[in-house]
Each structure stands twice: as C-alpha cells, then as structure tokens.
Amino acid sequence: MATQATLRLLTSVLLLLVPFLLPLAGCDNTMPAPTKNAMPAPNEPPPTKPPAGTTWTVAASGALGDRTSLSSVAWGGGRYVAVGIKSVPEEPYTVRGVILRSTDEHTWTAASGAGNLDGTYLIGVRWSGTRFFAFGGGITRSRTGWSEVIVHSADGDTWTAASVPGTDTLHLSCYSGSPCVTFLTDVAGDGTRFVAVGFVGTTFSNAVRSGVILRSTDGGDTWTAASVSGDLDGTRLIGVRWVGGRFVALGIKWTSPSTGRVVILRSTDGDTWTAASGAALDSALLAVTRGGGRFVALGIRPTSISTGRVGVVILHSTDGDAWTAASGAGTTLDNTFGGVAWGDGRFVVVGSKSVPADPDPPTQRVVILHSTDGDTWTAASVSGDLDGTYLIGVTWSGTRFVAVGSNGSILTSP
C-alpha cells in the first residue's frame, strides 16, 4: 500500500505543475417533492437555487481507489474527462497515468483504450471542440530522461498518442548529473491550429531550464517546436488561450530569488511568437484562465524563507500585461490553490489549506472561492468529510462546476 507521505508527494507534484484554466460541471440541487395537494402560499416567490460555484457537495469519492490523485477535468461532447496519476509503488514505474470518463459527474469509469501510460504524469485535459487533449510528461522507455506527452480522443474512451518532438529534438539539455523533466501544462486551439506550452527543468518544482512551445496544424496528431523571438531560459509557461484572433501564452521568469516577471507571449499563427512587457511579481504562477473580459491567475509566494511557508496570490488582468492582486477571502497564509475556471458569470478557484491537528501532523482541508470580477473573493459552502483532500482541477460544463483532487475526490456545484 502507498504511504501517506507518498500520496502527499504525488499530490504536491500535481499542485505545483498544473496550470489548470478549464471549464467545469456539477450536480443538481433538488428540493423535496411536494405533497399531492400542496399549493404554494399566496404571493410566495418560488424557491431559488444558489448561484453556481457558491455551494458544493461530493459527487464521487475514491474514483479508481485512494491511490489516485486527479489533477484536471474537462467537459465536451456530452461528457466529462478527468486525468491524473495512480500510485503503483510495487511496479517498476511507481506511477501510472489515469483517464476517467463520466456523463453525469457521479459515475466514473476508466477509459478502456488509453494505451500504455506507465510512468506518465497526466496533469491537464482540454476539450478542443472536436476532441479531448490530455497532456503532461512521462519517463522515456529507455528510462534515461523525460519527454512531454500528448494523447487525444474524440469520445474520452479511446485515446491515441500524438507525435511530439521530445526533449532531445528540442535541444534542451539538462544540467549535469540531474534528470531532465519535460512537462506540458496547457493546450489551446482555434479549430485548425493548436498550441501546447510547458517547460523543461531539473525537478518538478525546482530549477526551470527553459519554456517549451509546440504547435500542430493537423488537428493535434503531429507537433513541432514553435519559433520564439526572445529567450525562454528559466521560463515556466503555465497557460495558453486563443483570445481576440491570436494565441496568448502566460508564465513566469524569475529575475531574483524573490521576484519574478510575468512572461506574455503572443502569436497569430502559433508558430512565430513575440514577447510583450510583463509586470514584476513576487509569486510563482500556477494556473490561469480567462472569462468576462479578463484573465485570472493563481500563484504562490514565499512568506518565510526559513520555514518554507508560502502564501496564496490571486491576480487579475484585463490585457494579460498589467496585473492586480485580488482582495477578500483566501489570500491568507497556507492556502494552496490548484485550479481556476470561469462559468455562469463567475470565477471559481479550488485548492486546500493546512489545518493544525495537534498532536498529529497538520491535515489539508478543501478551499473553494468564487468571484464575479476576479478581484473580490468569497468562500464557498462545502459539505462532506473532506479532511486530507486537495482540490487541483476545476471545469464548467455549461450548467454546473466540477472539481477534482486527491484520493480520487470529485465535487460538484449546481
């Protein structure tokens, strides 16, 4: 059996990598059936449901067992797809990528045609309008390094591996004596052209070697390295969107141990990219989404170098260039947010917070915030026993939100 420490480590990997900017869904909030002859009280307004994203319940738990950490979820083609990793410590690769599908957010089944995902970390999934893209990184079959991974599917059940350049082809060598880690963190497209972004580094959360941008013009089957005007050394790219007739990729590049600069890259064709000016930040961006005419990004900033403690930062921007720190609930110490989504006129971010459990080690408790403007945030109401659970990904289906996280947990909001 996997130890609790192992599961926390696997979940921490997903929290640090994912860029998650996705759509989401949830479950209906039903009312008790009226008696046969019941009549509404005169002039009494009909009961109203709370706005989507403000109240949450458990839709499913333990999907594929408690060794599973789900990192991302997407809705498309009348179904949900969730991806993540499963701990398999008794096998040579120790982890395996997992893909789940559902049509009702309550009953989830493993994809039957996912192929060989041994040693694969799936950290994101996106719906393009015609197919799902699941992406991340995995150990090479020679077990000498890591390579980016993209698989796609029209139905969420049968998946095909795309052709990707690989770390060696991208000429992104690793530091001496350190394994090379290559991950893709987001995918976007305009219907005919697709772009994937990510980074190469020496570890999951440590030194970043370079940003990565791939492009595809054949529907996502074959990917090649894009041309970038400027230096991507030390850049972690965490999100990409098709906005206003062009691709916009976002990330961060550290200029000192405590200050980073937001990286904004723009392209009309997905191949040739130019950099825009970016704001200086003292935080590391982890996820970004766009809705209601603005971007919202999530990140963390160190608050105590000696103890390693971090605080949460939520930023918003109308142009992707100038950023403002959000106010309200959730920007307190020890909260960790993993996913952000936009739907029904509202932003939702999901994550966790550390809760003291003296004399035992601190546990994690679910945190969900919502906002209509990206600036002022309010804590959502969450029901169910979710102690020890991290939420990492969230999406909007058009009628509801759905969030996923550690221990195979799946939550929903009507």
Image: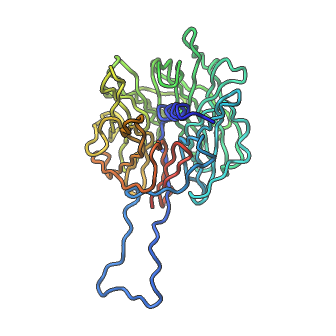
38 relative to 391, above or below:
below
401 relative to 12, above or below:
below
Q: Does residue 270 appear anywhere in the picture?
A: no
Q: Looking at the rendering, which quadrant does residue 360 occupy? A: top left
Relative image position of residue 327 (x, y in whole percent): 26, 42
Relative image position of residue 413 (x, y in whole percent): 45, 58
Q: Does residue 324 appear anywhere in the picture?
A: yes
69 relative position to 414: left or right:
right
Q: Nearer the viewer, residue 7 or 128?
A: 7
Q: How many marks?
A: 0
Residue farthest along the left direction in this orientation:
327
Residue drawn at (61%, 28%) of the image: 148
Q: Quadrant of the N terminus?
A: top right
Q: Nearer the viewer, residue 125 or 139?
A: 139
Residue drawn at (36%, 53%) of the image: 380
156 relative to 214, above or below:
below
Relative image position of residue 363 (x, y in whole percent): 42, 39
Q: Looking at the rendering, which quadrant does residue 77 occupy? A: bottom right
Relative image position of residue 292 (x, y in whole percent): 37, 50
Residue drawn at (31%, 28%) of the image: 279
Q: Nearer the viewer, residue 222 or 50?
A: 50
